[in-house]
Image (tube, coloured by chain):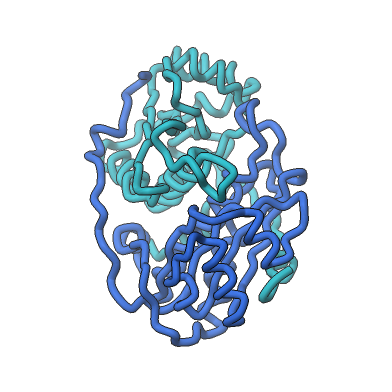
Chain colours: A cyan, B blue
């Protein structure tokens, strides 16, 4: 699919069909994450692919009860080792959140190509997800997304005008 | 350009031609950032487009002397308002780094479609860039990239095997 169409068609999908995601589609989505850039090329990611009904139900509990998460065939969780990533991003933070977000977004765009839906879940308890999925320290959990066949087309939530977002030369 | 080709062809470009980026290409790149998702759809971004030679030279100084940054026609800087973004991402952080990284990566992928190069700059001084570009509090600076015509094809820096990155069901 043409790149700009992917960007334009991506929506946050909050209703899913239970249909299984074919292996080749899943591999292409995960490969888009593998090919993401990362600070110092550390690639300090783990992508957790969860399909068991009990796990998915438990994750709903750690995500403020957002039940649609468990409707999809897969819940995908992105983690980054905060000690292995770049330690001095902007001279004020480690790069784990940036690295994790880039990889996750590349996978979520790839999902559109595959006819699959996703939704960035930021409303979660890191400690809750850590316990359910056995994520060890020093990995931080960047986000989760359902990954499956959309039951609806999602909503266009509206955008600020481009002119509102741009500063020319400097602020 | 086909989505997976964009993802595969993107490289960190560290050498640029001085050729000016046409306005229509720049607008399409910026629009890819505009269309990115963000926590609670806050869209708390600013994208700073800097072309003045003096500004670009000063930015090199705030980026550990990485001279190639000033070779490109444009330096693009992404900022996010840390008070306007989602305040409880993962119940442990504000979403500014995640939101900013997503928008920046969508723009950097769009650059590939336009035949332009980019390079995530994480080695910068936020305070230095803030002063040069007049970025006000409470905006945080997520990263910079040169945006221009590549003078070389960039290097494939190597990737971990996909199997190293994936955990099935849980850790």
Query: Residue B10 or A152: which is nearer the viewer?
Result: B10
Q: Quadrant of the N terminus of chain A?
A: bottom left
Which quadrant of the view contains residue B128? bottom right
Residue drawn at x 63%, y 20% is: A65
* x 56%, y 41%: residue: A93
Image x and y of residue B80, in percent: 67, 52
Q: Could you tell me if residue B86 is visible in this image? A: yes
State which quadrant residue A47 falls in.
top left
Residue A96, horizontal then vertical, whole percent: 48, 38
Question: Where is residue B55 shown, x and y percent of the image?
Answer: 62, 75
Q: Is residue A115 visible?
A: no
Horizontal placement of B138 versus B6: left or right? right
Q: Residue at x 36, y 20 (%)?
A: B169
Q: In what quadrant of the picture does the C terminus of chain A appear?
A: bottom right
Q: Nearer the viewer, residue A5 or A129?
A: A129
In the depicted structure, whether residue B121 falls above or below residue A21: below
State left or right for residue B5 relative to residue A144: left
- Residue for point 39% across, 53% down: A113
Residue A7's x, y, as percent?
50, 59
Of B2 and A136, the residue lying toward us? A136
How many callouts does the rendering have?
A: 0
């Amino acid at each position: 699919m043409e790149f700009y169409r992917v960007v334009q068609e991506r929506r946050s999908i909050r209703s899913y069909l239970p249909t299984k995601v074919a292996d080749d589609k899943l591999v292409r989505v995960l490969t888009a994450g593998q090919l993401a850039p990362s600070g110092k090329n550390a690639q300090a990611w783990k992508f957790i692919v969860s399909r068991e009904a009990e796990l998915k139900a438990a994750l709903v509990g750690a995500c403020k009860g957002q039940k649609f998460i468990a409707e999809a065939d897969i819940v995908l969780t992105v983690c980054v080792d905060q000690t292995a990533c770049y330690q001095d991003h902007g001279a004020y933070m480690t790069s784990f959140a940036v690295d994790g977000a880039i990889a996750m977004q590349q996978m979520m765009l790839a999902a559109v190509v595959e006819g699959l839906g996703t939704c960035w879940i930021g409303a979660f308890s890191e400690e809750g997800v850590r316990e359910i999925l056995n994520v060890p320290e020093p990995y931080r959990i960047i986000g989760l997304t359902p990954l499956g066949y959309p039951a609806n087309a999602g909503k266009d939530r509206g955008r600020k005008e481009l002119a509102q977002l741009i500063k020319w030369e400097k602020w």
